[in-house]
């Protein structure tokens, strides 16, 4: 690419140079030719007067004086003098013209192809005046176009041509240097980008280009670096997730194996109580698998909504009822802050249950004994309903607020299974809210508590294209 850029810039400089030389050459040829013809005409106009003077002085046509006068004739101009009866007295040309060998053809001047050959002639006849009447006539035949140049003219034209050639050579040199610099300047960062992309493709996700220019290449580098940042972050989350999953799977499986070994060895009786405990471990595994499957399907944008009219009051009541034993057991208070008037929305009941279950269950998980959990529901407008789930629990650090909806994100990486899950719950919550064309916000203060506000449209136009678009946008974010 560098070679192509360099060669194309060079070609542009060369073409410009050649065209400008041709243009200048044409202008010089025409203007100069016109100028010379006019000069010739101005010169020959003075001849009748001079001839008259020569004749009056000598009283006849003195050949010596005429020969002297012929030196003043323009090059390639022939003057024929006739008497008043029309008899030719003499015909003269500039002897210098003869010496130059009739420099009617300047030839190819410095490659500019300035042809000064004469192929068209003009004739002008003037009367030769005298005090006694007309002495005769002088007829001038001179080149109509270009004509022989005198030495000053030649040196003028050569000077112009030489400066043109010098300017052209300089332009070529500067153009070559500039095009070399530009191509280097453009191509080097692109080469860095290619190398970085190659290294990232081979797993070196910490590779960055760090090009600080403000042009398009700089912007490309910026976009590349931010893409690499997000790849690296995703890779970190993926690794963290794999570790979490391994942990989540191993713990219940180890526990189940211990139960079964204890049953086999007769250390524990396979009674109702022990079988229930074993069953809880199995439930935990089943829930984890179903969480992962739902999240995966939702993120692929393929989760098909089973739409129906949903009574949010009943839905929340059911969740609260299911979680009440746990909440009471932990010594938490629960405020149910919504009127008896029922709130309906159009949505998927199973997913909405999952959404609010995850939020209320989190409130329960992250709130210590004596704390309070509140579930509030109000109409934000005739078109939207707001559901706020707040707690007086441990709170979330401000720096983590933007990240908790990411898959597998957990604020406390070292917490125990009793207080935390896999970090999938809120990612699923976000996807479900998006599928219902709603929004979710979180406010929190460390040690004081957290409040999640979910806003859902009462009636939504469930255009599947829009949903998958929205999900894709979420994934990009
Ligand atoms: P997890 O299964 O780990 O709870 P979630 O996706 O539900 O995963 O939540 C992500 C993280 O957000 C949690 O690990 C927790 O640190 C934080 N979080 C969520 N809800 C609350 C809350 N009500 N109070 C404090 N922290 C919370």
Image (spheres, rainbow, N blue to C red):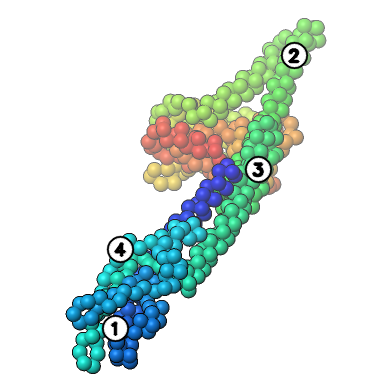
Q: Earlier in the sequence, mark 3 or mark 1?
A: 1
Q: Which residue is mark 2?
A: 257
Q: Residues within 10 Å of mark 2 (few under 14, many from 20)?
A: few
Query: Which marked residue is nearer to the observer: mark 4 or mark 3?
Result: 4
Q: What is the number of the mark on residue 192? A: 3
Q: Is residue 332 visible?
A: no
Q: Earlier in the sequence, mark 4 or mark 3?
A: 4
Q: Earlier in the sequence, mark 1 or mark 2?
A: 1
Q: Position of residue 471 (x, y in %)?
A: 50, 35
Alpha carbon separation for disc pair 4 and 1:
24 Å
Q: Earlier in the sequence, mark 2 or mark 3?
A: 3
Q: Is 280 in front, or is 173?
A: 173
Query: At 41% across and 46% down in the image, what residue appears?
Result: 381
Q: Is 370 in front, or is 3?
A: 3
Alpha carbon separation for disc pair 4 and 3:
66 Å
Q: Which residue is mark 1?
A: 48
Contact? badges 3 and 1 (CB < 8 Å) = no
Residue 189 vs 155, above or below: the answer is: above
Alpha carbon separation for disc pair 1 and 2:
134 Å
Query: At 48% across and 26% down in the image, what residue appears?
Result: 303
Q: Which residue is mark 4?
A: 120
- Quarter of the picture containing the C terminus is top right
Alpha carbon separation for disc pair 3 and 1:
82 Å
Residue 355 vs 338, above or below: the answer is: above
Query: At 24% across and 90% down in the image, what residue appears?
Result: 130
Alpha carbon separation for disc pair 2 and 3:
54 Å
């Amino acid at each position: 690419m560098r070679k192509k850029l360099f060669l194309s810039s060079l070609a542009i400089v060369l073409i410009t140079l050649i065209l400008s030389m041709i243009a200048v050459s044409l202008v010089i040829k025409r203007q100069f030719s016109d100028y010379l013809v006019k000069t010739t005409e101005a010169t020959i106009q003075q001849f009748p007067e001079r001839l008259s003077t020569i004749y009056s002085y000598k009283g006849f046509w003195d050949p010596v004086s005429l020969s002297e006068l012929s030196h003043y004739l323009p090059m390639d101009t022939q003057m024929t003098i006739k008497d008043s009866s029309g008899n030719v007295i003499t015909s003269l040309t500039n002897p210098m013209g003869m010496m130059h060998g009739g420099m009617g053809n300047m030839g190819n001047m410095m490659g500019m192809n300035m042809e000064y050959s004469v192929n068209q002639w003009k004739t002008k006849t003037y009367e030769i005046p005298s005090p006694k009447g007309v002495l005769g006539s002088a007829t001038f035949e001179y080149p109509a176009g270009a004509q022989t140049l005198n030495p000053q003219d030649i040196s003028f034209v050569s000077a112009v041509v030489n400066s043109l050639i010098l300017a052209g050579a300089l332009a070529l040199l500067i153009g070559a240097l500039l095009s070399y610099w530009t191509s280097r300047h453009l191509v080097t960062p692109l080469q860095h980008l290619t190398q970085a992309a190659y290294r990232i493709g081979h797993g070196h996700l910490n590779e960055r280009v760090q090009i600080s220019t403000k042009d398009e290449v700089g912007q490309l580098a910026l976009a590349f670096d931010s893409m690499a940042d997000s790849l690296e972050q995703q890779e970190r989350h993926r690794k963290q997730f794999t570790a979490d999953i391994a942990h989540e799977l191993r713990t219940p499986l180890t526990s189940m194996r211990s139960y079964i070994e204890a049953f086999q060895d007769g250390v524990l009786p396979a009674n109702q109580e022990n079988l229930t405990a074993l069953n809880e471990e199995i439930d935990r595994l089943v829930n984890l698998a179903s969480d992962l499957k739902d999240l995966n399907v939702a993120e692929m944008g393929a989760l098909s909504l089973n739409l129906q009219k949903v009574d949010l009051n009943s839905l929340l009541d059911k969740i609260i009822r299911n979680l009440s034993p746990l909440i009471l057991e932990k010594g938490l208070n629960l405020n149910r802050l919504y009127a008896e008037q029922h709130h309906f929305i159009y949505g998927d009941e199973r997913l909405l249950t999952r959404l609010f279950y995850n939020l209320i269950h989190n409130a329960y998980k992250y709130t210590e004994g004596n704390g309070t959990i509140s579930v509030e529901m109000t109409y934000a407008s005739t078109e939207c309903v707001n559901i706020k789930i707040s707690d007086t629990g441990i709170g979330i650090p401000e720096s983590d607020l933007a990240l908790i909806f990411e898959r597998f994100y957990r604020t406390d990486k070292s917490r125990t299974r009793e207080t935390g899950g896999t970090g999938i719950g809120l990612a699923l919550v976000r996807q479900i809210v998006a599928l219902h064309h709603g929004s979710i916000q979180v406010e929190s203060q460390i040690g004081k508590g957290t409040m999640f506000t979910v806003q859902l449209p009462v009636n939504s136009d469930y255009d599947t294209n829009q949903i998958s678009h929205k999900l894709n946008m979420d994934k990009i974010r």
